[in-house]
Every structure is written in C-alpha cells, then in structure tokens.
Image (tube, helix red, strand yellow):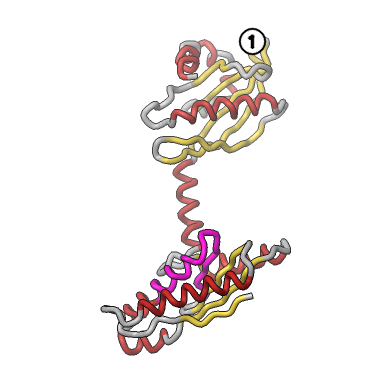
Amino acid sequence: LLNEIENRQLENRQLLQNRNLYEILAGQIEQWIIVIDADTAELLLVSQEVDRDVMDPDALRLLRQWLEQQAKAGYTEIKQAELELPDKRGARYYSATIHPIRWRGRNTLSFVLTDVSSERERLNNLQNIANHDTLTQLYNRRYGMQVLQEWLDEGRDFILCFADIDNLKLVNDRYGHLKGDQYIVYVSDTLRGFSTDAVVCRIGGDEFMLLCRDWPQEAARERMELLRGRLASHSGVPGAPYEHSISYGLI
C-alpha cells in the first residue's frame, strides 16, 4: 500500500485540476484526501505522504480494509463517518466526509479525513473528570447511579453492594483530614480489588457502591469478607495507628 500511495502521489496535480473534484474539496486541501474507484476500491489519489515515523504498520492495512468496506456501501450522497487507526503512540481518530463523485468516466469516492485526535483526547479527559472521584479515582456517584439504572432497565442480574468506612470522622478528628484521606484511599484501593469487572464508586464522603455481574451472592459475600480482612490486617501498622474496617451489605 505504501508503494501504491507513493505512485499515486505523482498524479495529484493532474487530478486536482479536475474542476468538479476541486469544487468539492475547495478549502479542505490541507486535510488528508483519498480518492478510490467506487466499484473496484482502486486507489486513485492520496493528497499527502504517510508519516512512517508515526503510522503503525497495521494502520495502512486497516485503512485499506476500511476503504474497501466503504466502496461496498454504495454511497450515492455525501456521508459522514469516523475512523480510528493505530499509531506508534496509541491511536489516531479521523472524521471522514465521503463524497461520491464522477471522474474520468469512473464512479469514485473521495474521502476528506480530518485528524480529530486532539479533540477526542480532550473530550475523553473531560469525560474522565466527569465520571471519576478526584481523591480516589474511583467512579463517582453520578456515573454509578447511571450504570445502576441502566442495568435495572435491562433486567440484568448483578451484585449490588453498599459499603461504609467505619469511624472516618474519629480518624479525621483525632489524626487530621490528611490521615482521613489516606484512610479513604486505602479503602478505595482495597474495594477495587473485588474484581477487574466491578464498577466501584465513591458515592459520598465515606460511602461506596459496588456493582458487578456474573457473581453468585455467596461468592460475592466471601470476597467482601476477604477484603475486609485485608483492611483489618493493615490496622496498627506504622503511620496508621487506628483500626481499618468497613460495614457493608449486598444483594
């Protein structure tokens, strides 16, 4: 595909002189433009070179597959789509505008790809802030209640567990809020160990909610007892001269 792209770049100037294509793409030439034959998926134009230092080797293969899928869709009007491609730093996201056009007697599809990776990262960061508790990095009350409602609406079977930290106010009053925060974080990390599939939320100052599917109630209770034992074993160690414990109920 790299060789194919490089060969087609030689034809860019002639192709862009085509008035119909130019009118469609006017003002967007700084974006990544790809044109393929709509019937055969043959690559006809690539407007810029692939950054080999950034693009993951699998990205070109996935791009080619995606272009072929779009060719089979039989578009007759302008469409919007999204495309995710791997790169050597993770992933890149593109917003794609697909133009079906007639060129040199061929039915073609013109793809105008806009890199929206920075915007996606910003939105993901905002979503992460909106869904997570700042101190513990567990999910927050809003997200937990949203998941709970979704699972109830879908009629799923799941474990619902509420847990409270014991004597947090006493720790705050006697040892200070810094120690109290450390207590909260330690309990949070312990509850996170229930299961990698569990949705663990801090829903209040000392209150937590845990949601998990595919767990029998007795097995879930045994796991919570195991976690409570881990908390108790931390009590009395240097830097934590108070008892670590939780109270919980589950169904």
Could you tell me which residue is drawn at 43 percent across and 31 percent down? 56
Residue 112 image offset from top left, x and y in percent: 55, 29
Q: Is residue 189 magenta?
A: yes
Q: Dot 1, crowdedness within 10 Å: few (<14), some or many (≥20)? A: few
Could you tell me which residue is drawn at 56 percent across and 36 percent down? 83
**Location of residue 65 by image quarter:** top right
Residue 88 image offset from top left, x and y in percent: 40, 36
Which of the image's four quarters has the C terminus?
Answer: bottom right
Q: Is residue 97 magenta?
A: no
Residue 146 image offset from top left, x and y in percent: 62, 65
- Foreground of the two, 98 or 168: 168
**Location of residue 35 by image quarter:** top right
Residue 57 image offset from top left, x and y in percent: 44, 28
Quick one: SS at disc 1? loop
76 left or right of 162? right
234 left or right of 250? left
Could you tell me which residue is drawn at 53 percent across and 37 percent down? 84
- Numbered range of the magenta stretch: 184-203
Q: Is residue 250 positioned above or below 97 on the image?
A: below
Could you tell me which residue is drawn at 70 percent across and 66 percent down? 152
Q: Report which residue position mark 1 lands on.
A: 104
- Foreground of the two, 41 or 81: 41
Give, as a three-letter code, the residue at label 1: Arg
- Foreground of the two, 219 or 146: 219
